[in-house]
Image (spheres, rainbow, N blue to C red):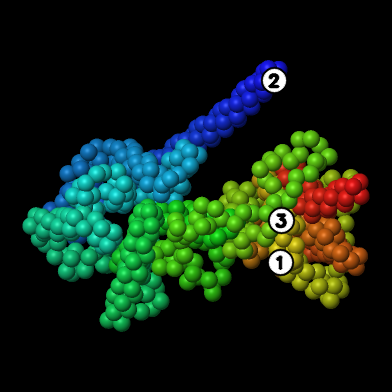
Amino acid sequence: MANAEHRGRPAEAFGGATAVGAATEIQARLRATRLALWLVAAVLAVRQVAVVLSTPRGERLTDLETWVGPDGVLHVKGSLYDSTQFTGTPFGGLVLKPLTRAAEQALGWGWTFGTLLLVVALGLVAARALPQPVGRRTSLLAAPVAISLLMLSLPVRNTLYLGQTSIIPVLLVLVACFAVRGERVSGLLIGLAAALQPTVLLFAALLWFTGRRRAALTSGVTFAASTALAWAALPHDSYTYWVHHIAGTGLGGPADDLANQSLHGLLLRFGLNGPLEIGLFLVLGAAVATLGVRRAVGYGRDGQLLLAVAITGCAAIAVSPTTWQHQLLWVLLAVVGRVGKRASDRYVWPVAVVVVMTLPAKMLLPHISALYTLRDNVVLLAALAAATMIPFLSRTSPYYRTPIPTEYAAPVPARFGWVPLLPFLRRVLTRPNLLLELLLIRVTYAAYQQVRLAATGGTNSAGRATAEKHGQQIFDLERWLHIDIEHWVNHTVVKVDWLRNFFDFYYESFHFVVPLSVLAVLYWRRPVDYRWARASLGFATLLALVGFWLYPLAPPRLMPALGIIDTVHGVQDFSKPDYGTLTALTNQYAAMPSLHFGWSLWCGVVIAIIAPRWWMKALGLLHPFFTVSAIVATGNHWVLDAAGGAAVVAGGFGLSYVFQGPRARVVKLVAEVDEERALVKR
């Protein structure tokens, strides 16, 4: 008995030490992650400041010039709205006018760093406002993540670049709701914010219906008193703003400008005007405000006050007569809402919000005329969706904290012990969210286009000499290898009309259609293999971008001395630096490696691996054969470009294996075989 007891104690002590060691390791990882995120936030802040201060004096802080410029608010003797582009309220002019005297002495540094501090304060308050209880990991990482997202967001970048004050009302509201005690102080801050941006008064309704009626009354009284004070001090300006321009409508840029992301701007862009437009705007605005406040009240009572604030702010965006780009931060705060019962669906809404608020609209949707209306109003539509339609989960929902888990494949030993290199990228067996996939594919492709064009300095002419030099190098190498068949193939095909037309059609039509079709079929019929194939394609494309950047290369059709006939784009004028109808959209000197062949080879390999019948595999492998024939016959690529395309595809599949291990179907089959062997042994 004594020996048994003595044997047990060291085991218990060892187990306790193991648990303590594991907890210590987790804490160390959290601290390291937190430090890394703070470094990211600092780098982003430094970058934003550097962008502003490195811009020429007359091109940056242009809105601040309305205060301190030679004809700005500080110097104008008449109305605030006579000789400037000032669009704020008379109270804003009255309060901020003396503050800008300091900004006049240090126009760039003082105002920029002051705005930066406001952004940091906003991120800290937002991080503290997350619905309780929150895990230790979330509490440690929320602040740097929030500040980083704010630094990346278009509203903050515009505010820093233009020298705007639009962060102040948002910060006042958040401080009033989460950082101060006492309803009177909260109401006072929100009233001051409403005096700067009148639609912020919508938060008084949120306070009233969530039981903070003293704060609501205080905010209304503060707003009225501030407006009356400005009216007494600046009667002419107050009349201009509140009566002649009706809450600032028409001040600044044209109300139908794309930068005005409000219902009023949307209706004007649709061609409506006059009494019809005003009446429709009032009706729609009232409906959005009512529904938005009602939803916000519900989530506020549910304990999600930050989400309630975000929804109210999104409603204020829509109902304001003018909502410029630097006034759209409320949409970013809506990222805290949880949507979806499945764990795999939880990322759709936050990713969509972050993408909309950090990337230009042109990167989100293709350059198609039918989508222009959607693209031009994407931020407004996101605000309307958050305020009126998105089904955010209640904290009483069983899925709020425990969503339906994602199904992962069982791990299996790989050929090398260090594979998978990133074990957290486990093989997922279930189908990913379609909306999220489409969004990521579109954004990734837009980034690919931008990087591909930037590889030659943003224009085709910038890299022409280097690209032609590299083209001569490739041509010389092919002659040495005796594979310089481009001229012979090109002129042979040109003589046969039907063959020329076939290769022209194949080159122009199948480059995107076939890969997207393969992805669509895998997504619908083989979700286990979809992620593996998509990751391999992504890695291959990333490697190709590195090739475009490091080795700009002129294709045979853009080499004047070779006599190659451009069968797709027609006869070229080599005295001009730009060629082809897609010059403005693509880099004409991104020939090495050939993604035309690379993507087609990826399709062929995926079909050959996954297709159940031999004739399907053979048909899939015909696609890269026809593609390599088309790119050479049309003069758009060298033979070695195809070899480069094959190399990046091999690298893509290799990286997918290294980072994630064997593909999910292989894992599943191995598990089934092991199970059968176990049954046989029994």
Question: Horizontally, is 316 left or right of 357 in the view?
Answer: left
Which of discs 1 and 2 lies nearer the camera? The answer is 2
Q: Confirm or deny contact between disc 3 and disc 1 (CB under 8 A).
A: no
Give the CA separation, mark 3 to mark 2. Answer: 51 Å
Name the residue type under label 1: Trp
Q: Confirm or deny contact between disc 3 and disc 2 (CB under 8 A).
A: no
Q: Quick one: label 3, few (<14), some, or many (20+) residues within 10 Å?
A: many
Name the residue type under label 2: Met
What number is the disc on residue 1? 2
> Does residue 309 appear in the picture of this structure?
yes
Relative height, residue 50 to residue 451 (above, below): above
Question: Horizontally, is 381 left or right of 585 in the view?
Answer: left
Q: Nearer the viewer, residue 208 or 534?
A: 208
Find disc 3 in the rendering and name its residue: 429
Which of discs 3 and 1 lies nearer the camera? The answer is 3
What number is the disc on residue 524? 1
Picture quadrant where residue 195 is located: bottom left
* Residue drawn at point x = 82 percent, y = 60 percent: 610
Picture quadrant where residue 237 is located: bottom left
Question: Horizontally, is 228 left or right of 281 in the view?
Answer: left
Residue 82 % position (x, y):
19, 60
> Does residue 556 appear in the picture of this structure?
no
Give the CA separation, mark 3 to mark 1. Answer: 13 Å
Dot 2: element? loop
Residue 426 % position (x, y):
69, 47
